[in-house]
Amino acid sequence: MAETLHIKNEISQLTHLDEFLLQSTGSLDLNPGIRMNLKLAIEEAVVNVILYAYPGETDKDIFIHLEHSEKEVCIVITDYGIAFDPTDGEKPDILLPLEKRPVGGLGTFLIKQLMTKVSYCRTGNKNVLTMIKKIH
Amino acid sequence: MKITVENGQEMIISLAGQLDTLTAADFEKEVQKALLDEQKHIVLNGEGLTYISSAGLRLLLTLQKGMKNKGGTLRLRNIRQEIMEIFHITGFSSILTIE
């Protein structure tokens, strides 16, 4: 089972994620926690692409490909923007007290925490982010 | 997402639905209003909140910091298990007051 969603680099396009996730994983019996984790990983990754991959440019492509077996869900996000490796960020210090906690910087951290395996590669002019989540 | 604000002895903000990058803008307005308000005690009711992304977490942290700076309190109530998981992963469970 595999589906691909093609969106443009605009925040308003995020409205398509729910329906896409429902359509592409509808046959799986996913608990609400896992469903939320999948959406969260996709949203965080796609928002990064929308905000940073194509500075100053509009109408640019982002592809979200999802396929699954009974055991795992694999999501591949592809864009043609500037090279960016979301797996290469600094880990936030989650033990800092309130006064010292910076606001922001949690998106890519959440992806890495919630997914079973995350990998990135730059192929030609493409950013390819692959996220795998074991579901059973 | 639906946001309901009740003003009484404490301000109760109830969130229902998904707090994501798109809906964060609506919640941000309420956060800014609440921080400018004289009210010192805010309860955030998360009974209907089914999803939160980093955009929502950012606003909760802004609200928590702002309330503390003005000598007030923020308490979160009725947080669902899947949202609590995100709070634990990000360390928010130790910087927010969750009842």
Image (cartoon, rainbow, N blue to C red):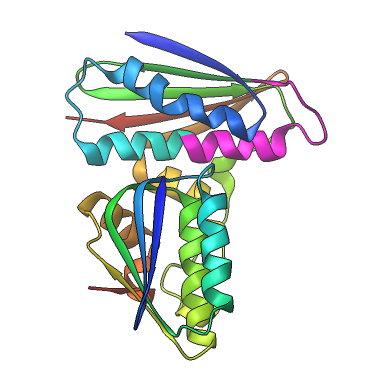
- Look at the picture and state if B60 lies above or below A31: below
Can residue A54 be found in the magenta stretch? yes
The answer to whether any part of residue A102 appears in the image is no
Q: Tell me the quadrant of the picture where the C terminus of chain B can be found.
A: bottom left
At 44% from the left and 48% from the top, the residue drawn is: B53
Q: Quadrant of residue B73?
A: bottom left
Query: In the image, is residue A134 above or below residue A102?
Result: above
Residue A113 magenta-highlighted: no
Q: Which residues are magenta?
A: A43-61
The residue under the point 52% across, 85% down is: B38
Q: Quadrant of residue A83?
A: top right
> Considering depth in this image, is A11 or A43 the residue closer to the camera?
A11
Front residue (pair A51, B40): B40
Residue in the picture at 40% in, 22% down: A19
Q: Residue furthest top?
A: A1
Q: Is residue A17 above or below residue B63?
A: above
In which quadrant of the rendered image does the N terminus of chain B lie? Answer: top left
Q: Tell me residue A101's x, y (percent).
A: 52, 73
Of the pair A92 and B35, the residue shown nearer to us: B35
Query: Can residue B54 be spotted in the picture?
Result: yes
Residue occupying the far bottom of the picture: B71
Q: Residue at x 34, y 16 (%)?
A: A24
Q: Identify whether B52 is placed above or below B12.
A: above
Horizontal and vertical percent position of residue A98: 47, 78
Residue A29 rendering spot, x and y as whole percentages: 16, 24
